[in-house]
Image (cartoon, grey):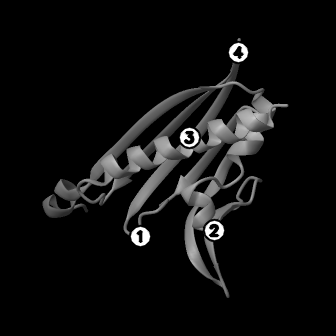
Amino acid sequence: MVTDEIASSIKTLHIVKEVLIAAPADVVFQTVLEPHGPMKDMKMKLEAWPGGRWFRDLGNDAGHLWGHVQVIKPPKLLELVGPTMMSYPVASHIQYRLTEQPGGTLLTFTHQAFGLIEPGLEQGVNKGWGEMLDHIRTAAEKKRG
């Protein structure tokens, strides 16, 4: 049974961002699978198969599990589930949906979460995901050939 105290502290997070990238979907999808910007500096790794881990590899069997691959359908869809960067009771669902359009690929990014989310987290996470999408756009557009 959930007590009133616990129920009142459960929060949700909902972020949706769209970016048009001047590159084909296969190039954008491959770029999504690579760490960029702060994610690269944090030594993030993604095992790109169903059930694969998304984690921070600190070496010597140390690190932080951010999630698992729930769905992977190249070059259109990647879904990850797990606590992401939060080391407290939280369940997150992250989705990258790619749709080819005239002039490139529309990348729709969604991050939804619920749990004991700390106050003020959404603002920082929203900014961080925006920066990461800018890195993906820049890298994919350089690769497009």
Count of number-bearing discs:
4
Kindly identify which numbered label has been placed on residue 87: 1
| Pair 4/1: label in front | 4
Identified at 46% across, 62% down, the residue is 85
Task: Choose the circle earlier in sequence order: 4 or 2.
Answer: 2
**How packed is label 1: few (under 14 Cα within 10 Å), some, or many (20 or more)?**
few
Residue 131: x and y in percent read 49, 45
Kindly identify which numbered label has been placed on residue 43: 2
Task: Choose the circle earlier in sequence order: 3 or 1.
Answer: 1
User: In the rendered structure, are the residues bearing label 4 and label 3 in contact, judged by CB atoms less than 8 Å apart?
Assistant: no
- Find numbered disc 3 in the image and state the secondary structure of the residue it sits on: helix
Residue placed under numbered mark 3 in the picture: 133
- Find numbered disc 1 in the image and state the secondary structure of the residue it sits on: loop
Identified at 41% across, 70% down, the residue is 87
Mark 4 residue type: Gly
Task: Choose the circle earlier in sequence order: 4 or 3.
Answer: 4
Residue placed under numbered mark 4 in the picture: 103
Task: Choose the circle earlier in sequence order: 2 or 1.
Answer: 2
Q: Quadrant of the C terminus?
A: top right
**How packed is label 4: few (under 14 Cα within 10 Å), some, or many (20 or more)?**
few
Q: Is residue 6 left or right of residue 25?
A: left
